[in-house]
Amino acid sequence: MAFLEAHTASPNCAIVDFHVHHAQKLKELKDALANVGEDEQLIAFDAMQHLGLDHHFREEIEAFLQKQYHARAYDNCNHQLLEVSLHFRLLRQQGYHVTTDVFNKFKNIEDLTSGLLDKDIEGLVGLYEASHLSFQGEDALDEAGKLSHQILTAWLPNNLDDHRAPLVAHSLRHPYHKSLTRFMAKNFLNYFQGTEKWASILQELAKLELNVVESIIRNEILQISKWDLDETDELPDYMKISFKALYDITNETSDRAYKRHGWNPIESLKKSWAILCKAFLLEAQWFRCGHLPNAEDYLKNGVISTGVPAVLTHAFFILGQGITQQAIDIVDNINTPGIISSTATILRLWDDFGSAKDENQNGYDGSYIQCYVNEHEGCSDEDARAYVVQKISDEWKRLNQECFSSNPFSESFTKLALNVARMVPMMYDYNTQHRLPSLEENMKSLLFDSFLAQGSPGQTV
């Protein structure tokens, strides 16, 4: 059972024990990393991010990356593919200006990898992971990512007994940049290999945190399940409820933002709801008349009707970081390309890629694919789907460039928008039974799978 659950007889004692044990492991890990080389630190920091532990080492990671960037360590000609790929990915996602030129020494990557399949699998995984942070116009990195994907996919079936195989399969299915760390951490830990002292301590720390997170989530679900619905029959007309709830939430959010951050966002919040309602109304009009617009008009409206702009507008003011007029102008204008519009576009296209048919709606509400086929004579459904896949990829590049280049938003808001985009594939990956197997699998893993084997009471790790 989880650490806290093993101490239910004395919850206060359990909390104290956890914090003491947790602090001890953190100190041990920091001490261990102080005595290893830079390449090993690079691998350790990458593992921390996959395990969701990097927030404990923000200062150390930032200092390390700043040193690496100014020393141009990523240009070291002696570095192998894995080190170069990790440098590129960690620096770019931290906002440092690093170009794909760092991969120039691997221009003949196909010739290189063809003779090193058994030696540099880790390097190919690193390259594949790095390719997901590409910007628009970085075609060489895109091609390198596709090539590494092809090579790893071909390697995997013939090497299932190799200790690297589970990690390769995990990376191909869930590249780090486009996945939610909380859902993926447990699987990564199961595949993580390392005999170094720091690796052993990191594993212990990850197990400890994962078990505590499971305990907290289970307790929250238990509390929610006690919700009292006895008064439901006495509720007034549903439309009045909806409007009253919307009115109260909007004003409450505005009041909270004003008290905490000194800025009243009521006009921006009201505008976000008004725009969303107009988008819903326009879709209803299309539905009623049975006439679909062209693909561009459909997507322009569909980006708003995802609800993402309204949600992120509220989140922006609740977080209260980086509230400037420039940022507010972007938040208020969804038609301006940026972090919010790119995130919403990814959701809309993914939703429509699953198709209305997958959601058992018989296609009556239309989709981008349907609009695109109608607009392009002779275009098949398969052709349209291929086009949407490429369009999603292009939108991810725009989102990467917005997030990892200079922008008026805070790091917290940027990360929130990225996590919304990362959540999308799980939310809209319908199977033939109209279920969401990927989301179900990850939620079961997070909530119900016991991370540790059953042990005696008091067992901590």
Image (spheres, grey):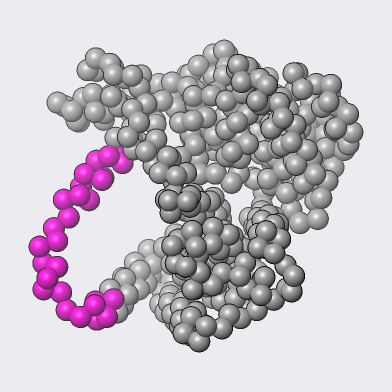
The magenta region covers 216-242
State the residue in front, 135 or 31.
135
The residue positioned 48% from the left and 18% from the top of the image is 201
Q: Is residue 257 visible?
A: yes
State the residue in front, 240 or 372.
372
| Whole-percent x, y for residue 453 in the image | 33, 19
State the residue in front, 42 or 425.
425
168 with respect to 106 (left or right) = left
Mark count = 0
72 with respect to 52 (left or right) = right
The residue positioned 54% from the left and 72% from the top of the image is 366
To which quarter of the image does residue 233 belong? Answer: bottom left
| Whole-percent x, y for residue 65 in the image | 67, 36
324 with respect to 228 (left or right) = right
Looking at the image, is 71 positioned above or below residue 161? below
7 with respect to 63 (left or right) = left
The residue positioned 43% from the left and 62% from the top of the image is 360
| Whole-percent x, y for residue 49 in the image | 55, 35
Q: Quadrant of the C terminus?
A: top left
To which quarter of the image does residue 302 belong? Answer: bottom right
Q: Is residue 328 visible?
A: no
